[in-house]
Amino acid sequence: MSLLVVGSTAFDTVETPHGTATECLGGSSTYFGLAARLFTPVRLVSVVGSDFPQRHRDLLQGHGIDLAGLETKPGKTFRWHGRYSQDMNSRDTLDVQLNTFGDFRPKVPAAFCATPFVFLANGSPATQRSVLEQMEAPRFCVADTMDLWITHERDGLLELLRRIDGLIVNDGEVKQLTGKANLIQAGRACLALGPKLVIVKKGEHGCFVFSNFFHYALPAYPTEAVVDPTGAGDSFAGGFMGYLATCDTISLWNMKRAVAYGTVTASLTVEGFGVERIAQADRDTVERRFHELQQFVSGG
Amino acid sequence: MSLLVVGSTAFDTVETPHGTATECLGGSSTYFGLAARLFTPVRLVSVVGSDFPQRHRDLLQGHGIDLAGLETKPGKTFRWHGRYSQDMNSRDTLDVQLNTFGDFRPKVPAAFCATPFVFLANGSPATQRSVLEQMEAPRFCVADTMDLWITHERDGLLELLRRIDGLIVNDGEVKQLTGKANLIQAGRACLALGPKLVIVKKGEHGCFVFSNFFHYALPAYPTEAVVDPTGAGDSFAGGFMGYLATCDTISLWNMKRAVAYGTVTASLTVEGFGVERIAQADRDTVERRFHELQQFVSGG
């Protein structure tokens, strides 16, 4: 089934111990889309400036991503510049220029409004809710958020949480959101805020999945070659939602497989700068890693 | 089969966000022993001062721990005083008084020398090797170590690594030992130093198990009530070695179960100050948590 993502498109300048990549294609919708397209066609809603080159559109479209919802506005595309620590477990933002993304008011094309699977990438809760209001009762809607909204748009975020099916956040965010220092307590408390499913990303330590029916832990794929962690979270979400959109039912079994596929697509993204590696990946590579991950978890 | 541990016995004063415990029974051999005794009788080799009370001996012996190797020397017992951070992921040592443990020269009683399973808790590599020299070809010998020895006794440690079967260390230690920032690379590099098995503890994030035949990841038991993390690592080792000592073969299957049992005994220890909780635990509690951990990992 079809899958819609609403999020940012950006030019990222990234410094890691492995080098620097300047103004490479990035943004949540891009990472999500390039991961999800490995499973299902993707509909993208985002905004860029007039400086966004045709070659990036070609890349995305060439990977089965429908850009009918990619608005082009006068001005420049969103730019982000970050530097990772030596162990790549933390990063400093050196510069942010929101540019055309600064007043992003997502307009979902009419042809996209009945999309059954929806991912609301990180954005203000008001913006995320405005997307939901344009959709015709999506079957499964998942959102991301960040510390900024947890602190400054808490009420709006809590309203959003009552209206979505799933939330994908990192460990720090879920602790901040719930005020619980223990991650298991935080996951449970987050479920009580509305979502039926809470996925807590722990970076190199994998993820926890919380629902009222089961708790589940999966380690990260054991990659030996982390080059640039940017986009790992959105690529995780893309693999997760992309696989789920191919399933007949949103069962526990399928959800667990989807989490493993998300883990695999995230592992591919971090092995190259920007979208380099995930854009090159094919389904065979994904299946091979999926199998390796199963072995890693089972010890088999 | 019987199991021997050589390590410290201490009085710990511990400050955590949940309170302070003063001069409670601690030390690596104690945590190890109280976890391992849930599976098999334990032989303990350690040293205490003349201030070590009979009630602690009674506690240990009452739990099937043979104290024939617990030497009592004039002077005081080893004392450690630490304070944990708010999230309990780091700690400061406020005071250490080695006392009688300062010149600990383990003497393995003749009746213990043929023990097939041996755990060398954290200590100087020279001290650890001196134990091996007293043993009659143990079947399975595992050691712990720490940053101090990796930095200052590197050659001695490398010699030890060539003579043991398994190493249990934390993520920071294995990176320091091997000079690899990536944990998977570090685990592989550590295997090349000699041990057939390397278990990397990641605290609340569970552990990785490396061997030349398989890699395996297991999350921590999802405890919601961490009171005092002291002794988690030694309790893990105790559950791991304790279970393994009951097995007919050291197979992959048994190793994986042993890692899960270690994860469970560690989870019990951290739910109380000092050895309070692990000393109270019984095998039924362990089996229940073992089952819950399997469910957490399988999502079942």
Image: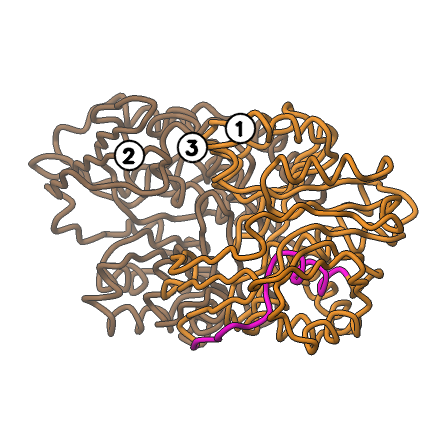
Chain colours: A orange, B brown
For this view, does B124 lie left or right of residue B205? left
Rendered image: mark on residue B269:
3
Task: Please tell me which residue lies in front, A70 or A154.
Answer: A70
Q: Are marks 1 and 2 in contact (CB under 8 Å)?
A: no
Element type where label 1 sits in the image: helix
What range of the chain is rendered magenta? A19-36
Can you name the residue that lies furthest to the right here? A248
Q: Chain of mark 2?
A: B
Magenta highlight on residue A24: yes
Q: Amino acid at mark 1?
A: Arg
Task: Please tell me which residue lies in front, A158 or B79.
Answer: A158
Where does the image place residue B216, in percent across and percent down from the top left? 59, 59
Q: Which residue is mark 1?
A: A154
Element type where label 3 sits in the image: helix
Q: Residue at x 77, y 34 (%)?
A: A133
Q: Amino acid at mark 3?
A: Thr
Q: Chain of mark 1?
A: A
Q: Who comes first in sequence, dot 2 or dot 3? A: 2
CA distance for labels 1 and 3: 37 Å
Pointer 2 local density, CA inside 10 Å: few below 14, some 14–19, many at least 20: many
User: Which quadrant of the figure contains the C terminus of chain A?
Assistant: bottom right
Where does the image place residue A248, in percent across and percent down from the top left? 92, 47
Element type where label 2 sits in the image: strand
